[in-house]
Image (cartoon, helix red, strand yellow):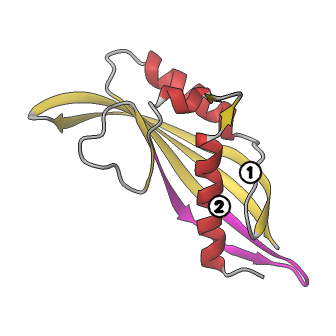
Amino acid sequence: MTDSADILTNFTTALYSKFTALTAGVHNDFYNAVNGQLFEDKVPAGAAFPYAVYEVISAPKEKTFTEEFREIYIQLSIFSSASSSAEIKDAYAHATALFDECALTMTGGTVLRMYEINLVTMTEEMTVADATETIRHYAIDYSILIEKT
């Protein structure tokens, strides 16, 4: 069996691969909606809106007599500075179309399920380039069950 840390690394690699995959030479709609910007844990300084960030929230182990599972909870956050909510709603729709109940191929485990369990929408005031902007933030929580191989 693979190490637990490898499961997290392999899962995040699979998630990012799903995000960047090309179909007939074209990126998916979520990739395009966030300008190809999906970051793990932290946004680099100067990143242009819109963008997305994901982080692992928790990853408890589950064991049966012969199998080991990992239930991973991630939060996928989408940020937009557009004056209307249309841009972030569009990105959210594309994110859920790409990731909710999706198939992921990963090393060291089999993804049994991945689905949205919660959505929190926020509007925040943020200082960007010496000015205050209104930023829309959608935080999508996902539950992923992986059987270790």
User: Residues at badges 1 and 2 in contact (C-beta under 8 Å)?
Assistant: yes
Residue that label 1 marks: 104
Please name the residue shown 31% across and 26% down the image. Answer: 81
Q: Is residue 4 left or right of residue 35?
A: right
Please name the residue shown 67% across and 54% down the image. Answer: 143
The quarter of the picture where the C terminus appears is bottom right
Q: Is residue 20 left or right of residue 107?
A: left
Q: Look at label 2 and name its amino acid.
A: Phe
Q: Quadrant of residue 60?
A: bottom right
Which label number is shown at residue 11? 2
Query: Where residue 17 sits in the image (x, y, percent)?
Result: 62, 49
Q: Earlier in the sequence, mark 1 or mark 2?
A: 2
The quarter of the picture where the N terminus appears is bottom right
Q: Which residues are magenta?
A: 53-71
Relative to 115, say whether 89 is above or below. above
Q: Please, which residue is most extreme toward the right here?
A: 66
Determine the CA span between mark 1 and mark 2.
Answer: 8 Å
Query: Where residue 120 sits in the image (x, y, percent)?
Result: 49, 39
Q: Look at label 1 and name its amino acid.
A: Leu
